[in-house]
Amino acid sequence: QPPRGRCSSSSSSSSSTTTKSSLTSSSLTAVDTSCENKLDTMGEGLCALYTANGVDCDEYFCDDCTYAGLCDELCDFCIEVEEEDEVSTNDECKDQLDENIGEGECSFYEESGYACDEFFCPTCAGKGYCDSFCGWCSTDVDGTITWYER
C-alpha cells in the first residue's frame, strides 16, 4: 500500500484531547477506495470541526492512527487501489469496526444507539462494519460463510 499524504489543513494546536466517545460518529469501510470524509457522513463538517479545534490529521487520522480513514479527503490521505486489488465485502464475515478501532467497538456503537437493523444492515450506511456481531453472517468451522437476510 503506497504511503499516504500529509495533512493539507492548517492546524495550529494539537493540545486538544480526543476521546473515543468524541469520535463515535464514524463510518468505516473494509476497503476504502474512495476519497471522502467518512466522519462527515454522520454530521456534515465534522472533520473540519475537529481539525479546526486542534485534532491533527497526522496524529489522529493517518493510515496507522486510531481514527484512520475517517477524514481522508480533508487530510489529503487518499490512495488509489488497482481494480484487481479491491476486496468484495462478502469475502469475509467479520467486524471491520472492531478490527479498525479495537475489540468491542461494535458493541459500543450498538449501545450508543447505532442499531444493527438500522445502521449496520447490508443495505445501510454502516454495512460491512459489524456483520458478524449483528448476525448478518456466520463462518462455519470449515470456513464456509453463510449470509443471512432479516
Image (tube, rainbow, N blue to C red):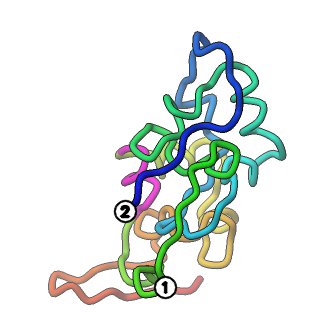
Q: Residue furthest left?
A: 142
- Residue 16: image quadrant is top right
Cα–Cα gap, marks 1 and 2: 14 Å
Q: Residue furthest right?
A: 44
Tell me which residue sits at (70%, 45%) in the image: 74
Q: Amino acid at mark 2?
A: Gln
Q: Amino acid at mark 1?
A: Glu
- Residue 92: image quadrant is bottom left
Q: Which mark is first along the chain, 2 or 1?
A: 2
Q: What's drawn in magenta, residue-wise?
A: 95-102
**Mark 2 lies on residue:** 1
**Mark 1 lies on residue:** 83
From this view, report whether residue 55 is shown above or below residue 41. Answer: above
What x and y, as percent, mark residue 112?
62, 42
Which residue is at the front of the view, 72 or 4? 4
- 96 vs 16, left or right, is left
From this view, report whether residue 23 is shown above or below residue 107. Answer: above
**Label of residue 37 in the image:** none
SS at circle 1: helix
What x and y, as percent, mark residue 89?
47, 79
